[in-house]
Image: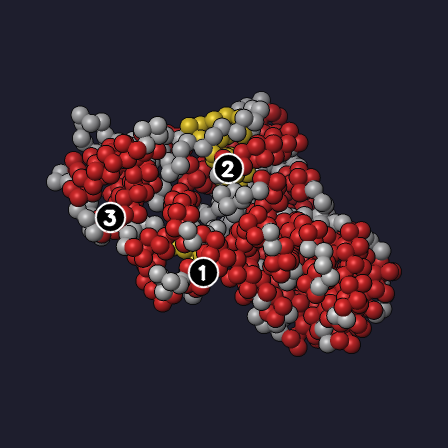
Amino acid sequence: MTARVPGNLPAEVTSFVGRRRELAEAGQLLRTARLLTLAGPGGIGKSRMARQIAVEARRSFPDGAWLVELADLADGEMAPSVIGSALGLFHTTTSPVTDLVEHFQGKQLLLIVDNCEHIIDSVAALLGALLTSVPTLRILATSRHVLGVEGEVVLPVRPLSTPMPDRPIAAGSDAVTLFAERATTALPGFAVDEGNRELVTGICQRLDGVPLAIELAAARLRAYSLEDILRRLDDSLHVLVSTLRTTPERHRTLESTLDWSYRLCSSAEQILWARLSVFADGFTVDSAEEVCGGDSVPRHEVFDLIAGLVDKSIVTRDGEAHGREARLQMLGLLRGFGAERLRESGEERAVRLSHRNYFRALALRGGTDYFSPREFEWSRRVRREHANIRAAVEFCQTELQDFTAILEIAAPLQLYRVGASFVVEEHRWLSTALEHDVEPSEIRARALAACSYAASLTGDGDEGERRAIESEALAKQLGLQQVLADAACSIARASFFRGDSARTLELAREAAAICREVGNAAGACEALYRAAVTAFGMRDDRASEFAEASLALATEHGSPFRTASGLWIAGLQDWRNGDQERATARLREAVRLYDSVGFVAGIAMCCEGLACAATSAGDYERAACLRGAADTTWRATAALFAKAVVRSLNTEPVDQTIRRALSEARYQAAFSRGAGFSDEETLEYAVGGHSQPPATRAPSESVRLTPRETEVAELVASGMSNRDIAVKLVIAQRTAEGHVERILSKLGFRSRAQIAAWVTERGQTQK
């Protein structure tokens, strides 16, 4: 099992070469700077360096390091929503900035904002507002330009070190090391030795140590010798110097490298490179074949052509894609170069239309794949392709002025809307398109219901109801019975988010009846679930009837998400009815299903329910442990609307029962153990039925902390941050961090929560 590490970064950045001095300097700056900006030209390695800095520094941030990529975002006003999405934040107000501020409050968190330069004004204003409102927040940004935010510290990212022209010894040169590492991928067995050292050094010097240029050059060893590469680089640079005299030398070097890479491609590969530039945040082979195949590049040739671009390091495979469908990427600079070629070719509009049509078709699958065994795969694809869907919407809005197409794309995103955190962005798409596409139509009626759903999830029940009522009226006018049923569900949902329980219950019952009458099983299942949750919170005896009916429909149609939801509320009703064995079995099954569909908030909901069942069964320590695991999971997901659903059930007295049954020290120890679980440990504990939490290495009796370390451990247990500890003990923050690191190492622990539990237990044994 691995320890819980908050954030969305990988455990390490693969194949990171050099820059130890810069990394150390950045680490030092992050201890005091609120905003650290890595500034430098394209291709210099800012993004990779930012990831490495974050990986090395995140142990200093108990609430994690979170990466937000803005390269594909054209509208700077959407930056708050995109940041919230990367954090897994489910927006509950109409102001994503407010949601971010509330989410960040009290947290020691590092936010990495990558590629800011193209929307620099909007990003600078946002980051300035966040830093002003959240004193504990630290931000690491990458940009080609300084952001200009008050308090910003700028660390220039320079080229990799290369040997001096009069000292061709390559030892210790980061540029040569990078070339050698990438060269072994292109030509297995390659090594820098006395026979080729001067040539490798010459190539790295000619490329000014620019990492992207070096990687592209190294990839050419598949087809060229070192002598060929160096000679052709000289020729290419000579040509460019005559036409780009006003461009800085380093930019000319990179431009020439890209140009040479392009000229080394076959004609078909060049065309495909240009066409692939329409994809945002990657693509699959299937999508590339559909979008880019045709005319001079037949569809059946795309597969092999992509392989050729991979060989030339123009396209790379996503290192995390190990399933049956690999995901491919192109660096931003390579995409930009391809986009220029696409514009020059005169086929940009046609390719972008093909791209729009492909992702509109993916969205429209929601009409058939939602509420079926296919919904998980569909929703997974939609979430992974969000950047491409955004690009399709922006093309419809800015270039085509086709607002009907936007409604067609955004309206069917049903499960995606629930299980992901892009609801603010989708709400904006729908709202804007509805303002322009006002003609009565079925798609407008469906989009109004969808907009109602999105508005309710952002916390605006008033707009949710207004949109739903308009959808209902239009559906009646056009005789659209299925849409009428969806509108009824939307009205009930809006009422729930407005907090009117009695009205919600009646509306949900009516919606379920309407949906059943017209054969809208998905709507009936959702309305019955809404009725069950509302009735449970009201202690209405009909809650069990509604829950069982919703679960039966979900099971019949094979919907994993709705089945999990049905099991959750039915299990809670079993708990209230006194059947703890059945309640526990259903809630454990719900945990497995929520995990399979990636709905982390659902796992937290189930842990809360299992804690209720454990309490009624008299297993109070297990109940406290489950509540601790739920608390950490809630904080990791920030799914505020899901937590609001749980709170509407009025189960707070359970916690009071646990506290009365245990001493406060025992309660805190069990709660802290659960709070320190990794994601895997939480799942194992929730479904495995262990009477004790998964084992962690107990500290040996021979382990002794120094008096200062003991003091620091007690302050950690009291909830103090490293900064608070430093102030309390009048020491440097870095010294406090060092004490905490040594305590973790000595005790064999992986989290501050485990230190807290150890301090509590130690206090008990010494009484």
Q: Residue at 72% across / 45% down in the picture?
A: 93
Labels 3, 2: front one? 2
Mark 3 falls on what kind of element? helix
Residues at marks 3 and 2 touching, judged by CB atoms closer than 8 Å: no
Give residue 689's position: percent from left, percent from top.
Answer: 61, 64
Give the left or right position of residue 138, taking residue 12 as reference: right
Q: How many marks?
A: 3
Q: Amino acid at mark 3?
A: Arg
In the orientation shown, which residue stands out farthest toward the left?
195
Dot 1 corresponds to which residue? 291
Query: Which of label 1 and label 2 is nearer to you?
Result: 1
Q: Position of residue 470 (x, y in %)?
A: 79, 59
Q: Residue furthest front?
A: 346
Q: Which mark is residue 426?
A: none
Query: Residue 395, image x and y in percent?
Result: 54, 51
Q: Is residue 95 above or below residue 222?
A: above
Label drawn at residue 220? 3
Q: 46 or 685, which is in the foreground?
A: 46
Mark before the other along the chain sequence, 3 or 2: 2
Q: Residue at x 32, y 59 (%)?
A: 305
Nearer to me, 466 or 197: 466
Secondary structure state at the residue bearing disc 1:
helix
* Quadrant including the C terminus: top right
Residue 13 vertical placement versus 367 (above, below): above
Q: Amino acid at mark 1?
A: Val
